[in-house]
Image: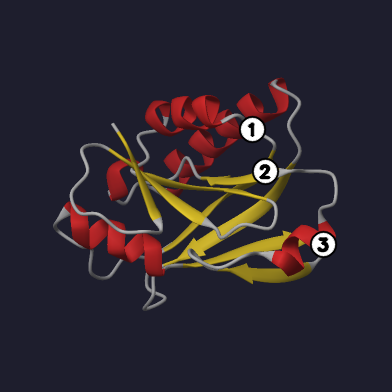
Amino acid sequence: MTAAIQPTTTDGLAEAYRLAAYFVDIDSEIIEIAVGYPALRLETQLARADTFAYITACNPASQLQPEAWNQRADRELRAAIDHHGYLRWPMNSSSPDGQWWEAGWLVGDVPPALLDEWARHFGQRGTLLWRRGGPVRLRMYGPAEFPHPQIDWIE
């Protein structure tokens, strides 16, 4: 993972997360999704879930960490997902300019409260959460910095 330019304000970070590209690996097929749009192609492949969430344990607070640190945090997140018995699939995110990549997980049917708990535990500022057929929504953690119809601010 590399990082070139990191947004310095919360709203810049929220906008970067909102505009990021998100990629799910389903049976060696890469499916791209985007905030604000339905993920119908992905949902067709994953008929076993009604809600979907993306979370990573990498680079808490959008601060670049060593690869070994990120791998350790990812193992802890995988263990938490597996402990609860949720389905998961590899997923990555990329900044709009392609300079910042993070590995994470698409999780099926995780309750929002548990997703929020994991996000706080791993120091994440944002996750994705949406219902089948609906648009992908960004969840940002912290006080609402600016309103946006595609962002849910969770304090």
- In the image, which disc is placed on residue 51? 2
State the residue position of label 3. 44
User: Could you tell me which secondary element the residue under label 3 belongs to?
Assistant: helix
State how far apart marks 1 and 2 are (Cα). Answer: 7 Å
Indicate the amino acid at tag 2.
Answer: Thr
Q: Are marks 3 and 1 in contact (CB under 8 Å)?
A: no
Q: Is residue 25 left or right of residue 136?
A: right
Q: How far across and how far down the image is residue 135, in percent?
A: 56, 60
State how far apart marks 3 and 2 are (Cα). Answer: 13 Å
Indicate the amino acid at tag 1.
Answer: Val
Query: In front here: 100 or 86?
Result: 86
Q: Is residue 30 left or right of residue 28?
A: left
Residue 147 higher or lower than 58, as above or below: below
**Residue drawn at (30%, 50%) of the image:** 62
Give the mark nearest the N terminus, 1 or 2: 2
User: Could you tell me which secondary element the residue under label 1 belongs to?
Assistant: loop
State the residue position of label 1. 110
Residue 53 higher or lower than 99, as above or below: above
Q: How far across and how far down the image is residue 58, in percent?
A: 44, 45
State how far apart marks 3 and 1 are (Cα). Answer: 18 Å
User: Could you tell me which secondary element the residue under label 2 belongs to?
Assistant: strand
- In the image, which disc is placed on residue 69? none
**Residue drawn at (69%, 58%) of the image:** 133
Estimate how packed mark 3 is, as few (under 14), some (14 to 19) or many (20 or more) residues with alpha carbons within 10 Å.
few
Q: How far across and how far down the image is residue 86, in percent?
A: 73, 32
Query: In front here: 122 or 87?
Result: 87
The residue mark sitting in front, 1 or 2, is 2
Q: Are marks 1 and 2 in contact (CB under 8 Å)?
A: yes
Give the mark nearest the N terminus, 3 or 1: 3
Residue 60 higher or lower than 39, as above or below: above
Give the mark nearest the N terminus, 3 or 2: 3
